[in-house]
Amino acid sequence: MTKNARMILDVIQHSDMHLTAEQIYLQLKDCDAKLVLATVYNNLNLLYKEGLIKKVSIEGYPDRFDKATKHDHLVCKYCGKLSDICLDDLTERLNAQLEEPILDYDLKIHYICPECKQKQHSSEHKPEII
């Protein structure tokens, strides 16, 4: 593994967030002034293909990168906030239903996060200005 790939993997593994390539680049730029964004993208693709990280794609937002540990995600319908959720592993049930072995699955549950729910609730109860 290259030095850059190791640094990127370390950033992802030690983050509590789901970082974009740009966020990773900005964190590493301080450590390595020669680093370019294309290097980050190339290494992220390599780490993803090797199964060392997860790529979380949500329509309308840049891809985000996450630890490769088994977990699922909650995605806010309004703001795109991404949160981890640990549910029972569905692999056995899916295998039984499909009658074919599955390799993996990526479960994203769409919901409205508490912050957006609060904003929505507040805007519904604003007094009308005449």
Image: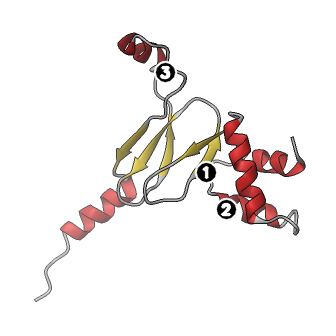
| Residue displayed at 56% across by 53% down | 63
Element type at marker 2? helix
Say if mark 2 contacts mark 1, CB within 8 Å: yes
* Separation of marks 3 and 1 at Cα, in angstroms: 22 Å
User: What's under tag 2, amino acid-wise?
Assistant: Gln
Residue 129: percent from left, percent from top: 14, 86
Residue 67 shows up from this direction: yes
Which amino acid, by three-letter code, is at mark 3?
Asp
Work out whether 84 lies above or below 118.
Answer: above
**Residue at the spot of label 3:** 89
Single out the mark in the foreground, 2 or 1.
Answer: 2
From the viewer's perspective, tell me whether residue 57 is left or right of residue 115. Answer: right
Residue carrying label 1: 17
Spatial separation of the CA atoms under disc 2 and disc 1: 10 Å
Q: Quadrant of the N terminus?
A: top right
Mark 1, secondary structure of its residue: loop
Image point (89%, 49%), residue name: 3
Q: Which residue is mark 2?
A: 23
Crowding at dot 2, Cα within 10 Å, few <14 / some 14-19 / many 20+, comes out as few
